[in-house]
Structures are given as C-alpha cells and as structure tokens.
Image: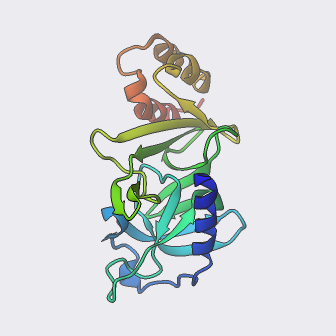
Amino acid sequence: MLVTTLLVVGAQLLSGPVPTAPPASDTTRLVRGFMNQQFAWGTLVLRDGRRLQAYLPATTTGVDMMVPYYVLPPDAQPKSKPKLLAINKVKCMRVQGQYSELLTPDKNEMPRLAARRQAGAVELFLVQMTAPPLVATYLGSAPVLGAPATSAPGTAVASWYLRRGTGVPLLITPENFTSQVPAFLADDKELAAKVAAGAPGCRFADLEAIIQRYNQRPRR
C-alpha cells in the first residue's frame, strides 16, 4: 500500500510545469533545499523518454524512493517548494558530472537510483540509504519520504552494486565479496586471486579502490 501511494503521488507531482533553464550563473551553484540537502542544476531522463531539467539532489550516494526537485532555485523568493518524483519513473540523472541510474537488481527489490562511483569495464554503483526523520502529524509521528539517500552517522546503510556491460547489477555484501567479486575481475588473475584470498588492500572496505584499479589497469 505504501509503495502504491508513493508511485501515485510521484505521478501527480510530475504533472506540474516543466522547468526552464536558469540564468547561466546558476548552473554551477549549489543551493540548500529539501531535507537540508544540496541541490544543483541537472538533468533527469525519464523512462518515457522525456528530459526534465531542474534543481536536483547533488548527491554521490544515490537517491531512495523519491527524487525531490525544484523548478526554481531552492533559495528563490518567494520560497520555492520542492516537487517529488517517484523513482520508478526515472531512467537516469546527471548533476554536475555525477551520473546516477535506476537499478532493478531483482524483481523482488524496490528500484533504486544509484550513483555510479566507478565507470569502465566494470561499473560500481552506490545507494546509501538514511532512515528518514520523524515529523509530528495529527496522527502522530510519521517518516519523511522523498529524501535523498545521504550520509548520517549511525543511520546510513550503504548498498554497493557491480555490473559488467549490460548484465544485471549484483549486490555486493561482506558475505559474498570473496566469492562474487573475483568473477568480475577474471581477466586480471593476480587481482582476482588477492580478492578471493582477502589480502590486505583487497577486502570489502576496499571495493571502490579495487574496481578503480581494475578499470585503470593497462590493457594488453
């Protein structure tokens, strides 16, 4: 029921006015907005082929559930109000060079707009979800939905995904790290062996550095 409600709300909010380009001086500006997050001018590509330019979350950790955006700068006067767009309507997003893509790793999982942390032969994506704050309503406390996935000590849960080519993204966890990651590195036998053995510098905490090293290695 919650998921259905969110998707309906997102569809309704998207029907508002189409954003237009801001003054040139605004295109590189970071502005505080919804949930005290940073927003910048960027582009959303929707699954129906439409492109939406607006002030979008300037995040390197992905967005969960809903994408908040502004037609006008968040600090515009009179105060600009955010709109919310359901994640399942988005194909990809680019804000200040950061590319994020809708991932659907498994039919039983909710889709996620994950930030691409490493590009190349093997792509690494991240969604870092944060427990939403509670707000008081006449029904009692309720979570705020539609917040960008951001870092917050003690509340953030990071989900890392690997993908090769057009393959299905695979969730990498501490439990499957040594069994799954070496397969993505198979043509670099030395690195794959170190990962499989859990060698120093080749452990789960080093995942981003490992993929960067693999993608930047000399090609024969």
Is residue 52 visible in the rendered image? The answer is yes
In the image: residue 55, left or right of residue 7 = left
The outermost residue toward the front is: 139
Task: State the residue at coordinates (46%, 10%).
Answer: 197
- Please give the name of the residue rendered at 34% of the width and 53% of the height, measured from the top-left corner: 133
Horizontal side of residue 92 vs 155, given as left or right: right
Whether residue 90 is visible: no
Q: Where is residue 25 in the image (x, y as percent from the top left)?
A: 35, 82
Residue 191 pos. (x, y %) = 49, 20
Q: How is the image coloured?
A: rainbow
- In the image, residue 183 sits, relative to residue 138, either above or below, namely above
Left or right of 193 in this view: 128: left
The residue most toward the top is 197
Q: How many labels does the image show?
A: 0
Image coordinates for residue 128, horizontal then vertical, percent:
42, 44
Residue beneath the point at 61% across and 22% down: 183
